[in-house]
Amino acid sequence: MADLIKVGMADYKVGRSPSTLISYGLGSCIGVSLYDPQSKIGGLLHIMLPDSTQARASDNPAKFADTGVPLMLNDVLALGASKSRLVAKIAGGAQMFAFANATDIMRVGNRNAEAVKQILRRHGIRVIAEDTGGNYGRTVQIDLQTGIYKVKTIDRGEKEI
Amino acid sequence: MTDEFNLTPIQLDALREIGNVGAGNSATALSQIINKRIDMNVPKVALVPIESVPDLVGGADTIVVGVFLRVYGKAPGNILFLLPQKSAFYLVDTLMGREHGTTKSLDFMDESALMEIGNILSGAYLNAFFNFTHISMLPSIPALAMDMAGAILNIILVQLGQMGDQAMVIETEFLAEDDGINGHFFLVPDPGSLGTLIKAVGVE
């Protein structure tokens, strides 16, 4: 039986085949997965906010897109993944409550998705699949044996990207 | 300024007492609407790591109905009324005068009824706060979502997450006499609001 490794909010985990990394109940948060299909090494990061410029020194870097992605990238490379083979898949970034006059903070899902893509681009990592936006929660998991990224929802079923 | 994450036992007691009266008001209001006795526990006033807040309601992937209201005024914050899906359906059946077990999903009218409940509970709750603190706080129009608890809690955690890794949560659990309904009422002051509240009740 392959390992199922849970990734909490503002957290990340890395691993290798045959483990599966899973993160439950993402709303505006984003689940960012990295995967090297040859070495079958990868990681999953659950970020809450786009950037850490307002953060305090004591803050957990895995909470932010701009600090969390490099952190996970380093660990994935340390396990033996090759940077040139790494591909990313991302999911989440919903706006859970519809407000007529939504403030910036309520649209944080969009900004999270943009920030994640930008930081991945800056590190030269391709985003090969994406399931972001909407107004519903997602549970995501990456199977490190196959690289399949599964996105589960309550009313919209389950898909593999 | 009061360090929000370093409250004295007296300050915590004061917040708990306000929460208690607020929740008492809300419970009475709910009880009158559905014509059942509502019990509530002594509110928890606790500083919790942000990532563990979903565990308070059964885990990040538990299906819940959430009614969210933004609180405006001198001590802004957020209110979230969370009901496990089963409780929400039961409450809707009660409100609509249907036999229990009828509701299997929420239509527009059901959602509207639940939002109205959120509205009434918040109004009752904030009234108690006003009586103690003389800080007037106004709730926004409610919004509703039915989804995974983790996803719904995102909306309040994200705002807190900008400021730190911990959340000050004033939380009360409601329970109807026939066990059909239980719910969690969260008041989450914005960073900075807690100091204002504590100052207002004179336990600085």
Image (cartoon, grey):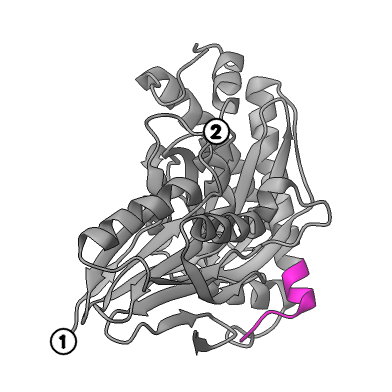
Residue that mark 1 sits on = A1
What is the chain letter for disc 2?
A
Residue that appears at 55% across and 63% down: A27
Query: SS class of the residue under badge 2?
Result: loop
Residue that mark 2 sits on = A54
Judging depth in this view, the residue of A21 and B86 nearest the camera is A21
Q: Vertically, is A94 above or below B19?
A: below
Left or right of B89 in this view: A16:
left
Residue that appears at 48% across and 80% down: A151
Q: Picture coordinates of residue B88 (x, y %)?
A: 59, 71
Amino acid type, mark 2: Gln
Query: SS class of the residue under badge 1?
Result: loop
Left or right of B182 in this view: A143:
left
Amino acid type, mark 1: Met
In space, the residues marked 2 and 1 are separated at their CA atoms by 43 Å
- Return the disc, 2 or 1, that comes first in the chain's sequence: 1
Left or right of A15 in this view: A9:
right
Magenta region, residue range: B104-112
Give neighbour class at mark 1: few <14, some 14-19, many 20+ (Cα, 10 Å): few
Q: Vertically, is B142 above or below B76?
A: below
Question: Disc number at residue B76?
Answer: none
Q: Are marks 2 and 1 in contact (CB under 8 Å)?
A: no
On the question of residue B121 being in view, the answer is no
Judging depth in this view, the residue of B108 and B23 nearest the camera is B108
Q: Picture coordinates of residue A47 (x, y %)?
A: 46, 55
